[in-house]
């Protein structure tokens, strides 16, 4: 009997399309039908691209017939976070500032999707300019968690994570500056990966913190994510920080490996704000890893107290400088009825940006200002170097650093923004990978007492993306099957 499209992984669907047992349009229609069912309750997309996707599906089908595509994902429908440019289609960053902005060129990662014959379903919702952990700061309204619609999906790539978790897309692209792929993946019960800094070109990704930002895949399992990373990786002359990753293919030769894997768990990560249920699930995962032959040790991460302060200083400093370009002149929103240039700047930025973005710009401008630069920005840069050195030392002895992806399961809608500082603290486990440029993957490791999913994070040394994927795959196989709410047919309101 033919397997139902919605039960296939992205790689299985790609294979079915290649064999001709399913057409590209049928694959697309299965996702569109799911979007029709899910979007009224979730709002994962800012801009669905139904018509464009149909046209692309037709072209791709013809390309497949001609043997044009090498990627195993040709014909597979994928969603893209709305901070990556897609030529001729509005790209909003979930901000009023870019509400009607239509770019004249595409991000390199998006171009690569199209070259591989991947079908783009639409642009997904996010926190405004990727600043946030809940997808509640979007100008276009919140996205809800497919597991429980009274909860946030996490953020900032919450739309991408919700779309995959709800079966609207088989895979999605997100961006990760301090956890924005891994944390929503954790909250939505899917896999999300932030690759080594430079693995994927940032050209055409609307910048938040340029030294931290990295595009990566979100998917239902580790293999699908590796396949998508293969499509988007590579050195790009339009991004001087991109690199030729020594790993030729992340998917080829990918095997789950736990035997002999040396796992370091930073003790500091198990204190304080870690929720009881998450802690229990984390220790269960440790047990499973040990039973499969991994060697687990507890280590100390002395730079832990500096992680959140250093991250928020660097991220806000870079954001304040990156967002200078939104001034009402170059592109995007422009306020009306202004007297003179200065008033136009002020009014445009006052009306165009939301509160969280303004908070970050103010913080960033402050830490970079004369007289405070040494006390804040320079100190953060030093802490960042110390962290990198400390990680290097850990990776001399251990293969991966293991932690929860987030200290809690998905918070209720409306809870987090009341106390932004508390929300910032929830990035504790994810920011290391960004500050030090390391690869990290979040894999679901169970559900808490409320039935909400929780993620386990594997982090590795720079350029050891394959090793991290192998550990994550090994864990995924040992953990066993994992069902999303739409696959169980048990969707709660
Ligand atoms: N929550 C973090 C922040 O608000 C991370 C965001 C991201 O990775 N884009 O900065």
Image (cartoon, helix red, strand yellow):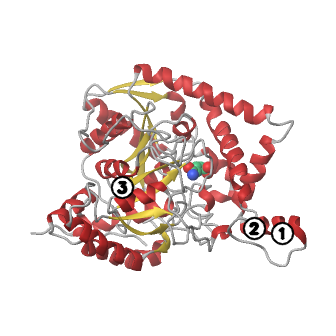
Left or right: residue 110 versus residue 378 is left
Q: Is mark 2 within 8 Å of ligand 1?
A: no
Residue 307 disc label: none
Q: Could you give the CA–CA distance between mark 1 and mark 2, rounded to whole angstroms?
A: 7 Å
Q: Earlier in the sequence, mark 2 or mark 3?
A: 3
Q: Is mark 1 within 8 Å of ligand 1?
A: no
Per the image, the residue denoted by label 2 is 328
Q: Nearer the viewer, residue 254 or 189?
A: 254
- Please identify the quarter of the rendering in which residue 469 is found: top left
Left or right: residue 55 versus residue 156 is left
Residue 344 disc label: 1
Q: Could you give the CA–CA distance between mark 2 and mark 3, rounded to whole angstroms?
A: 37 Å
Q: Position of residue 179 (x, y in %)?
A: 53, 47
- Identify the residue at horizontal 78%, vertical 47% (top origin): 365
Per the image, the residue denoted by label 3 is 219
Q: Position of residue 224 (x, y in %)?
A: 30, 52
Quadrant of the drawing holding the N terminus: bottom left
Q: Position of residue 200 (x, y in %)?
A: 46, 46
Q: Earlier in the sequence, mark 1 or mark 3?
A: 3
- Please identify the quarter of the rendering in which residue 432 is found: top right
- Identify the residue at horizontal 68%, vertical 46% (top origin): 318
Element at label 1: helix
Q: Position of residue 431 (x, y in %)?
A: 56, 40
Count of marks placed on residues: 3
Quadrant of the drawing holding the C terminus: bottom left
Q: Is label 2 or label 3 in front?
A: 2
Image marks 1 and 2: residues in contact by CB distance under 8 Å: yes
Left or right: residue 81 versus residue 483 is right
Q: Image height check: is 473 above or below 484?
A: above
Element at label 2: loop
């Amino acid at each position: 009997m033919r397997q139902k499209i919605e039960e296939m992984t992205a790689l299985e669907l790609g294979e079915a399309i290649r064999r001709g047992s399913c057409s590209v349009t049928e694959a697309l229609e299965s996702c569109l039908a799911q979007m029709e069912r899910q979007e009224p309750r979730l709002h994962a997309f800012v801009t669905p691209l139904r018509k464009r996707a149909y046209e692309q599906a037709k072209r791709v089908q013809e390309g497949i017939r001609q043997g044009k595509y090498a990627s195993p994902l040709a014909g597979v429908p994928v969603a893209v976070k709305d901070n990556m440019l897609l030529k001729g289609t509005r790209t909003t960053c979930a901000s009023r500032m870019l509400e009607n902005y239509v770019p004249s060129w595409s991000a390199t990662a998006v171009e690569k999707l199209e070259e591989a014959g991947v079908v783009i379903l639409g642009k997904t919702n996010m926190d405004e300019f990727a600043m946030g952990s809940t997808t509640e700061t979007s100008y276009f309204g919140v996205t809800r968690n497919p597991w429980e619609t009274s909860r946030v999906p996490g953020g900032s790539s919450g739309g991408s994570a919700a779309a995959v978790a709800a079966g609207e897309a088989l895979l999605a692209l997100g961006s990760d500056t301090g956890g924005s792929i891994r944390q929503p993946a954790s909250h939505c019960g899917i896999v999300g990966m932030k690759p080594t800094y430079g693995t994927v070109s940032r050209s055409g990704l609307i910048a938040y913190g340029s030294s931290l930002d990295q595009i990566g895949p979100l998917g239902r399992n580790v293999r699908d994510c590796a396949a998508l990373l293969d499509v988007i990786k590579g050195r790009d002359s339009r991004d001087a920080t991109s690199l030729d990753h020594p790993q030729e293919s992340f998917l080829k030769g990918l095997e789950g490996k736990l035997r002999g894997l040396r796992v370091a768990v930073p003790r500091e990560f198990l204190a304080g704000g870690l929720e009881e249920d998450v802690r229990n699930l984390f220790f269960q995962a440790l047990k499973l890893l040990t039973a499969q032959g991994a060697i687990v040790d507890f280590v100390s991460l002395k730079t832990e107290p500096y992680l959140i302060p250093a991250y928020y200083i660097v991220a806000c400093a870079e954001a304040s400088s990156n967002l200078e370009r939104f001034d009402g002149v170059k592109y995007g929103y422009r306020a009306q009825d202004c007297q003179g240039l200065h008033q136009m700047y002020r009014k445009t930025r006052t009306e165009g940006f939301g509160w969280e973005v303004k908070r970050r710009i103010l913080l960033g401008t402050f830490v970079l200002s004369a007289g405070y630069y040494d006390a804040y920005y320079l100190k953060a840069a030093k802490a960042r170097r110390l962290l990198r050195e400390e990680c290097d030392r850990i990776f001399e002895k251990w293969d991966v650093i293991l932690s929860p992806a987030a200290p809690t399961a998905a918070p209720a809608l409306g809870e987090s923004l009341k106390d932004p500082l508390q929300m910032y603290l929830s990035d504790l486990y994810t920011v290391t990978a960004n500050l030090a440029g390391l690869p990290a993957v979040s894999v679901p490791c169970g559900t808490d007492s409320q039935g909400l999913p929780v993620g386990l994070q594997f982090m590795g040394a720079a350029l050891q993306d394959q090793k991290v994927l192998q550990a994550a795959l090994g864990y995924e196989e040992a953990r066993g099957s994992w069902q999303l709410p739409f696959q169980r047919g048990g969707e709660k309101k």
